[in-house]
Amino acid sequence: MAAIQGLPLQAIDRTGASFAGARGNSRTGISILPLRLQGAVAKVRGKVLIGPIDLTIGRDGFTIVMGPNGAGKTTLLRLMHGLQRLSGGVLTWNLPQAEVRNRQAYVFQAPIMMRRSVVDCIAYPLILHGMKKAPARDQAAELASELGLGDLLNRPAPVLSGGEKQKLSLARALIRAPEILFLDEPCANLDGRATREIETILKRAQEAGTRVVMSTHNMGQARRLARDVVFMYGGKVHECADADSFLGHAQKTKEAEAFVNGDIVE
């Protein structure tokens, strides 16, 4: 089984809207991780999209999922998060599914904007989980400022630029300090400046305790961010290794070698 193992569990507290992740349950001290996939398969109308897949996501790290178009990167992320139905095999977390749902988040490649102001979009997850509107908006405003959206709090979310929308999506995902964050090519449609800002936010989130699993086609981005790499090919995990080995000169499969070298992988 391919395994991405992490560091020992460490408690990280989050006060107010401070920019920090959540490592372990604040009530029990138990992490939802590791996440284990054993023979996992995803199908749609009888067609296998990915699998069988054996993979373990440990408690710490920044995992980059790479591979050519159609390799199954998005489906793998959706399967782990719960957006894609498991058709076969086993997918298990360290805690029951009901607990897991509240401690993870997902950011799409194309930001999904609500017809609300920036501050209300960010506050929405808090309100949805029972927080009063006023303190929720206060926390949302503080986090927005930390992420560079402080001057846009009352602007309608749909009119933001592409980079601003993606930062808003990240703020909305991070406002409840998820233990793990899945991202599907969040910088694919952004310019260099916006990409740098998004990467900075993700590094800070990971350093604060949020486990990050992200897909990208950008080899430079992988080199800047990855601690581990999962290489998808033909709907399966073709290779799994630490970033230095995969992106360096260590021996790899011919498909992975071609991908790293920038060659066309069919």
Image (tube, rainbow, N blue to C red):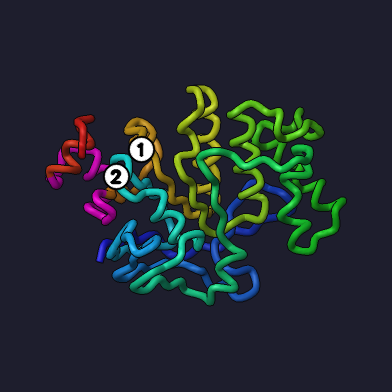
| Residue 187 highlighted magenta (yes or no) | no
Q: Secondary structure at mark 1?
A: helix
Which residue is rendered at x = 81% and y = 47% of the image?
137
Residue extending furthest toward the front: 45
Which quadrant of the rendered structure holds the N terminus? bottom left
Q: Secondary structure at mark 2?
A: helix
Is residue 28 or residue 254 the one in the foreground?
Answer: 254
Residue 243: image tag: 2
Classify 261 as above or below 124.
above
Task: Mark 1: give few (<14), some (14-19) or many (20+) Cα within 10 Å.
Answer: many
Q: On the picture, is 227 further left or further right than 33?
A: left
Classify 139 as above or below 126.
above
Asked if the residue under mark 2 is in contact with the one under mark 1, i.e. CB atoms within 8 Å, the reply is yes
Residue indicated by mark 1: 222
Classify 89 as above or below 261.
below
Which residue is rendered at x = 35% and y = 72% of the image?
88
Q: Position of residue 260 (x, y in %)?
A: 23, 36
Is residue 4 or residue 73 the one in the foreground?
Answer: 73
